[in-house]
Image (cartoon, rainbow, N blue to C red):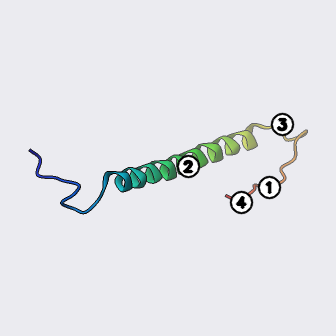
Amino acid sequence: MFGLSLNHNEINFKDLEAKIYKFVCDEACELIAQILTMIDDMLLEKRDKKEYRCKGKNTQI
């Protein structure tokens, strides 16, 4: 039908599923980190600067 077989390429379904799952999890982690960084920047700019001082950003990611 499609001419594609997992056995033909010597890849089993479990390994394929694990690789796809790891890839999706890694991409989701990067996306969440970007979103949280954007929110952190927004809060840093909109804070009451007289009341809340800036202690710097934590770069341990």
Q: Amino acid at mark 2?
A: Cys
* Closer mark to the observer between disc 2 and disc 3: 2
In the rendered image, the vertical position of residue 50 relative to residue 4, given as above or below: above
Residue that appears at 12% across and 47% down = 2
Q: Quadrant of the C terminus?
A: bottom right
Residue 30 image position (x, y, % from top left): 54, 51
At horizontal 75% and vertical 56% (from top left) the residue drawn is 58
Residue occupying the far left of the picture: 1
**Residue nearest the viewer, comparing 55 with 61:** 61
User: Which class describes the residues within 10 Å of circle 1: few (<14), some (14-19), or many (20+)?
Assistant: few
Q: In the structure shown, which secondary structural element does the residue marked by tag 2 occupy?
A: helix
Q: Earlier in the sequence, mark 3 or mark 4?
A: 3
* Separation (CA) of disc 4 from disc 2: 14 Å
Question: Which numbered dot is residue 38?
Answer: none
Task: Identify the residue position indicated by label 2 in the image.
Answer: 29
Question: Which of pointers 3 and 1 indicates the residue nearer the eye?
Answer: 1
- What is the number of the mark on residue 56? 1
Task: Name the residue carrying label 4.
Answer: 60
Query: Do the residues bearing badges 2 and 3 touch, measured as CB atoms within 8 Å?
Result: no
Please tell me how many numbered marks the rendered image carries.
4
Give the residue pinned by disc 3: 48
3D distance between C-alphas at marks 4 and 1? 12 Å
Q: CA distance from mark 3 to mark 4?
A: 25 Å
- Most extreme residue toward the bottom is 10
Q: CA separation, marks 2 and 3?
A: 30 Å
Name which of mark 2 and mark 1 comes first in the sequence. 2
